[in-house]
Image (cartoon, helix red, strand yellow):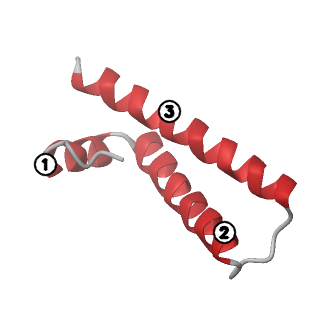
Amino acid sequence: MFEGQPQAEIEAVFQANPEFRRLYHHHKELDKKVMDAELGVLPIDETTLAQMKREKLHAKDRLVRMYDTLQNH
């Protein structure tokens, strides 16, 4: 998600902002569950999978906005 950003900047935001860190871990957890569901490892219905994908996208959007806001201050 932040592949193009310097690792030091990401680490600084991670250390300075607990909400960013929490949301980042939540996004990663959702990403793993979605991937497992798509691979058939995690049995889940399509409605729940779609909801998890929307939640993951929402988390990513919030993370990007938070990162941009923190870097521009």
Place residue 44 in its image quadrant.
Answer: bottom right
Q: Earlier in the sequence, mark 2 or mark 3?
A: 2
Residue 8 vertical placement versus 38 (above, below): above
| In the image: residue 31, left or right of residue 53 | left
Q: Which residue is mark 2?
A: 38
- Judge depth for marks 2 and 3 and give the one in front: 2
Residue at the image position 29 percent from the left and 45 percent from the top: 2
Q: Which mark is residue 8?
A: 1
Q: Using the numbered discs, state the Cα–Cα distance from disc 2 to disc 3 in whole angstroms.
A: 22 Å
Q: Which residue is mark 3?
A: 61
Q: Where does the image place residue 12, in percent across and percent down from the top left?
A: 21, 44
Q: Where does the image place residue 67, in percent across and percent down from the top left?
A: 33, 32
- Judge depth for marks 2 and 1 and give the one in front: 2
Q: Where does the image place residue 5, in percent across and percent down from the top left?
A: 19, 42
Residue 48 vertical placement versus 66 (above, below): below
Residue at the image position 76 percent from the left and 50 percent from the top: 50
Q: Which element carries disc 1, helix, strand or loop?
A: helix
The one nearer the camera, 17 or 35, is 35
Q: Which mark is residue 66?
A: none
| In the image: residue 39, left or right of residue 15 | right
Q: Residues within 10 Å of mark 3 (few under 14, many from 20)?
A: few
Q: Where does the image place residue 52, in percent across and percent down from the top left?
A: 71, 52
Look at label 3 and name its amino acid: Asp
Q: Using the numbered discs, state the Cα–Cα distance from disc 2 to disc 1 in whole angstroms.
A: 33 Å
Look at label 2 and name its amino acid: Glu
Check contact, mark 2 vs mark 1: CB within 8 A.
no
Place residue 58 in its image quadrant.
Answer: top right
Place residue 32 in its image quadrant.
Answer: bottom right
Total numbered labels placed on residues in the image = 3
Residue at the image position 49 percent from the left and 50 percent from the top: 22
